[in-house]
């Protein structure tokens, strides 16, 4: 890890660490054995003073944003999409159940349909994530939730742990 970070510095390019290791798209959870524990993720995130300051600034800019009822807070199905080799347009690689084939219905119609379906998805009224202060820090992703828990509405214990560990680490950033 340190060697990769040093290589980026030597090349003068930005370095970003991402702890995301997900189940395989077929549901196989074997890759999860390779990911760091949540507290290890936060330790790496905050090991560098510059990265710690970036996390502090990021959290400060996101913690008071009013929550919406949209299930997905990302750009999937709004400005982003993914097309597989068979021509199926999806809002994201992780969101497998919403897809339209651009070969049979054309891009514009497929995109419109995907956007409408994504806009119709709302967070449940009892969603554990709705008012969670860790949400800006955890990597909140209903697509990931579905891969890991089987439901877009059921949070990942791993991501919750990452959010908690990052929140605790923030309290030590001057």
Image (cartoon, helix red, strand yellow):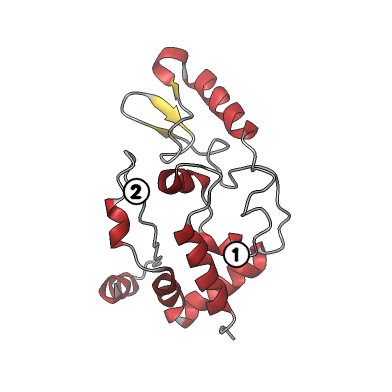
- In the picture as drawn, the residue positioned furthest to the top comes out as 104
Q: Is mark 1 on a helix, strand or loop?
A: loop
Numbered badge on residue 27: none
Question: Horizontal placement of 40 versus 51: left or right?
Answer: left
Which residue is under mark 1?
Answer: 134
* Residue in the picture at 50% in, 72% down: 165
Residue drawn at x 39%, y 16% as measured from the top left: 103
Mark 2–mark 1 CB contact (< 8 Å): no
Disc 1 packing (10 Å; few <14; some 14–19; many ≥20): many
Q: Is residue 119 above or below residue 15?
A: above
The spot of residue 161 in percent (x, y) is 49, 66
Q: What element carries label 2?
A: loop
Res. 132 image quadrant = bottom right
The residue at which mark 2 appears reads as 23
Closer-to-camera residue (16/130): 130
- Which quadrant holds the C terminus? bottom right
| Mark 2 nearby-residue class (10 Å; few <14, some 14–19, many ≥20) | some
On screen, residue 10 above or below 64: below
Viewport quadrant of the N terminus: bottom left
The location of residue 39, given as percent across then percent down, is 43, 73
Depth check: 136 or 7 in front? 136
Tell me if residue 23 comes above or below residue 93 in the rendering: below
**Viewer-closest of 134 and 100:** 134
Q: Tell which circle, 2 or 1, labels the residue nearer the N-terminal end.
A: 2
Query: Looking at the picture, how far across and down is residue 82, in whole percent?
Result: 42, 35
The Cα atoms of the two marked residues, 2 and 1, are separated by 22 Å
**Image coordinates for residue 152, horizontal then vertical, percent:** 52, 42
Q: Which residue is drawn at 51% across and 77% down?
A: 52
């Amino acid at each position: 890890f340190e060697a990769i970070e040093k290589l980026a510095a030597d090349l003068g390019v930005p370095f970003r660490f991402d702890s995301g290791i997900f189940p395989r798209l077929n549901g196989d959870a074997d890759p999860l054995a390779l990911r760091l524990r949540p507290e290890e993720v936060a330790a790496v995130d905050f090991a560098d003073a510059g990265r710690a300051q970036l996390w502090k600034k990021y959290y400060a800019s996101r913690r008071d944003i009013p929550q919406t009822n949209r299930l997905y807070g990302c750009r999937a199905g709004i400005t982003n999409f993914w097309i597989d080799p068979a021509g199926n347009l999806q809002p994201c690689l992780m969101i497998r159940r919403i897809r339209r084939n651009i070969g049979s219905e054309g891009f514009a119609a497929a995109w419109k349909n995907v956007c409408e379906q994504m806009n119709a998805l709302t967070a449940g009224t009892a969603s554990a994530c709705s008012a969670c202060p860790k949400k800006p820090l955890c990597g909140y992703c209903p697509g990931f939730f579905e891969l890991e828990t089987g439901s877009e509405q059921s949070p990942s214990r791993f991501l919750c742990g990452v959010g908690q560990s990052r929140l605790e680490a923030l309290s030590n950033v001057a």
